[in-house]
């Protein structure tokens, strides 16, 4: 754990780095990087980034934002600078970064260049504005098209993120693919044009204060009384441009310039910038940097609080206690033991019973057509009926314990194993997976045996009877032919008896082998059904236990993140 030092700036950096590393999903990493960059700069001389965002609402907000930025930076005491033309000609389909600072020697040739920064595909324009040169100011000019999507989410935090970390699309070489990149800022100015622009701005749910997110709307003719109590700044850019042009033409137009400049109200935007970006005498941290960090911590705290609320809700609504899991596991073990005992006892009774003895090999000649009926009846009555009822009761106990509360739309139990997934056309077919409320492996296996193995066993019985009868008839015919020939009755009778014995012996061997094989298959399929059912219930209980542990672990991580935020807030409060 990071210890507290006597340097609050260093403590704040360490806390933000810990927050970035441990809870990246709860903070805007781009804004954290901007805050860390500022904390690495000399106190009171941090670079401040301000966004001029023209709203895409069908009005002329984009060009209005460009005009407002120009008037906020223009120096009426000097003739028009080349950067003003460059700014006017810039296509707003691409964002623009304007760096404000004194240009050595006021070299116009240097000032004329519209460059692209290394590693950054956003064009940059260097501008000298005497009132703002000392503020280490960067301006981002762009149209805010993503605000509408953020508003549609209904999340005020998402709207703030879209304003204070607007997304720009840059071209990535070599194919020139457009990639969205977040560009975090300290302050933002929402710019609109006319009544439509004002209505759009007023409809945006902004959480940040006016010192961080301000708004300006261009009204050509409107009284001050009409805007009384309105949070937006009313500007008249046409009046401002006219005043600057008159003053540059003739200094004698100073009175007219002053009147038009006051009417334009652009000075309020300049004052808003200067009050936030200019260095102070005590080298204290600039307010936008402090506001940025405070906003970061507040947003992270809100997201953590929301996740904690969701985690606690899941813990209360969808959790089962460890002792309940232990009781259910004990009940599952007892069920499995009883099911295996039932399978062994009931099948032994069934295969030793009168119905199965009725299918002896010597009775197949008049019982071959009854093999399917008797076998299906035996499966329906003897194949784990009590175990199936007990597992339904156990599944009810699991449901009562609240295991499925966290996944109400998902099937709770797995489907039967792939070895028995053949679809049957009988009325006992298993319900679809979305309807399963208890393990259906036993009923599915019973349906499989009745639908696939029983018909095969009956077909084999009929085939063996036919073959045995045909073999006996063939040898009898051969005996008759030998009797009519030179052989006597003794030899002919021996041939007929040998054929009959051979046919019956073959019938006995094959049928008894088939019966034994079917008995073992029924037993094995029963054991598979029990194991699959037990695994299905155990998987549900294991998932519930892991979910309980996972929620507890998540809540512990959120608690640690909250401690980091408290540490950062403490360092921020000590920051000069």
Image (cartoon, rainbow, N blue to C red):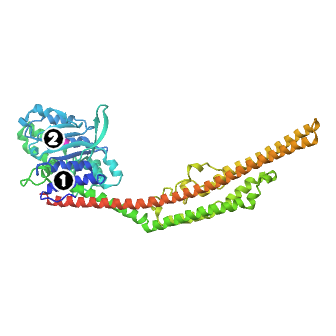
Q: Determine crowd level at label 1: few under 14, some 14-19, many 20+ residues with C-alpha closer than 10 A.
A: many
In which quadrant of the rendered image does the C terminus lie?
A: bottom left
Task: Determine whether the residue tagged by mark 2 lies in a helix, strand or loop.
Answer: strand
Residue under the image location 70 percent in, 56 percent down: 376
Q: Is residue 245 left or right of residue 203?
A: left
Mark 1 → mark 2, Cα distance in angstroms? 26 Å
Q: Residue 390 occupies which quadrant of the picture?
A: bottom right
Is residue 201 at least partly visible in the picture? no
* Of 357 and 107, the residue lying toward us: 357
Question: What range of the chain is rendered magenta?
Answer: 67-71
Residue under the image location 6 percent in, 53 percent down: 281
Q: Nearer the viewer, mark 1 or mark 2?
A: 1
* Of 237 and 99, the residue lying toward us: 99
Residue at numbered disc 2: 99
Measuring from the top left, give residue 2's x and y in whole percent: 20, 57
Measuring from the top left, give residue 244's x and y in whole percent: 12, 41
Q: Determine crowd level at label 2: few under 14, some 14-19, many 20+ residues with C-alpha closer than 10 A.
A: some
Q: Is residue 240 magenta?
A: no
Magenta-highlighted stretch: main secondary structure?
helix
Q: Is residue 463 left or right of residue 154?
A: right
Among numbered discs 1 and 2, the one appearing first in the sequence: 1
Q: How many marks?
A: 2
- The numbered disc on residue 13 is 1
In which quadrant of the rendered image does the N terminus lie?
A: bottom left
Measuring from the top left, give residue 362's x and y in whole percent: 80, 53
Residue under the image location 80 percent in, 45 percent down: 503
Task: Determine whether the residue tagged by mark 1 lies in a helix, strand or loop.
Answer: helix
Q: Is residue 69 magenta?
A: yes
Is residue 50 at least partly visible in the picture? yes
Residue under the image location 74 percent in, 49 percent down: 511
């Amino acid at each position: 754990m990071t210890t507290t030092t006597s340097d609050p700036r260093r403590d704040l950096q360490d806390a933000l780095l810990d927050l970035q590393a441990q809870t990246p999903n709860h903070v805007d990493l781009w804004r954290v990087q901007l805050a860390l960059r500022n904390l690495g700069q000399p106190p009171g001389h941090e670079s401040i980034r301000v966004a001029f965002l023209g709203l895409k609402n069908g009005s002329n907000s984009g060009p209005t934002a460009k005009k407002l930025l120009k008037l906020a930076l223009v120096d009426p005491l000097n003739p028009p600078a080349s950067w003003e033309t460059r700014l006017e000609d810039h296509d707003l389909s691409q964002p623009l970064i304007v760096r404000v600072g004194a240009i050595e020697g006021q070299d116009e040739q240097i000032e004329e260049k519209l460059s692209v920064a290394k590693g950054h595909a956003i064009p940059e324009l260097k501008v000298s504005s005497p009132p703002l040169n000392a503020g280490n100011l960067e301006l981002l000019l762009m149209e805010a098209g993503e605000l509408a999507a953020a508003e549609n989410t209904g999340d005020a935090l998402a709207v703030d993120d879209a304003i204070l970390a607007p997304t720009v699309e840059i071209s990535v070489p070599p194919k020139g693919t457009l990639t969205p990149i977040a560009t975090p800022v300290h302050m933002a100015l929402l710019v609109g044009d006319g009544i439509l622009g004002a209505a759009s701005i007023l409809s945006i749910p902004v959480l940040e204060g006016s010192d961080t997110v301000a708004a300006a709307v261009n009204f050509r003719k409107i009284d001050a009384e009409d805007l009384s109590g309105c949070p937006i700044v009313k500007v008249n850019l046409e009046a401002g441009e006219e005043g600057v042009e008159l003053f540059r033409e003739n200094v004698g137009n100073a009175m007219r310039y002053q009147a038009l400049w006051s009417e334009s109200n652009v000075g309020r935007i300049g004052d808003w910038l200067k009050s936030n970006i200019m260095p102070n005498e005590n080298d204290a941290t600039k307010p936008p940097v402090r506001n940025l960090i405070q906003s970061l911590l507040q947003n992270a705290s809100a997201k953590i609080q929301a996740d904690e609320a969701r985690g606690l809700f899941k813990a209360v609504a969808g959790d089962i206690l460890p002792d309940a899991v232990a009781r259910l596991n004990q009940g599952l073990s007892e069920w499995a033991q009883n099911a295996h005992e039932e399978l062994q006892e009931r099948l032994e009774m069934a295969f030793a019973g009168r119905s199965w003895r009725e299918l002896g090999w010597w009775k197949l000649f008049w019982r071959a057509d009854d093999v399917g009926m008797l076998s299906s009846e035996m499966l329906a009555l003897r194949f784990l009926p009590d175990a199936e009822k007990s597992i339904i009761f156990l599944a009810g106990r699991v449901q009562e314990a609240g295991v499925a509360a966290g996944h109400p739309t998902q099937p709770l139990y797995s489907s039967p194993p792939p070895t028995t997934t053949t679809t049957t056309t009988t009325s006992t077919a298993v319900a679809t997976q979305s309807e399963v409320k208890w393990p259906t492996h036993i009923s599915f296996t019973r349906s499989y045996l009745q639908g696939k193995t029983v018909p095969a066993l009956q077909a084999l019985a009929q085939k063996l009877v036919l073959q045995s009868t045909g073999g006996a008839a063939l040898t009898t015919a051969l005996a008759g032919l030998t009797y009519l020939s030179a052989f006597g009755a003794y030899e002919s009778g021996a041939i007929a008896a040998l054929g009959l014995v051979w046919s019956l012996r073959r019938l006995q061997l094959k049928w008894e082998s088939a019966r034994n094989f079917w008995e073992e298959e029924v037993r094995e399929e029963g054991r598979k059904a029990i194991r699959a059912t037990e695994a299905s219930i155990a998987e549900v209980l294991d998932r519930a236990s892991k979910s309980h542990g996972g929620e507890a672990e998540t809540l512990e991580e959120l608690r640690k993140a909250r401690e980091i935020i408290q540490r950062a807030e403490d360092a921020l409060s000590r920051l000069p």
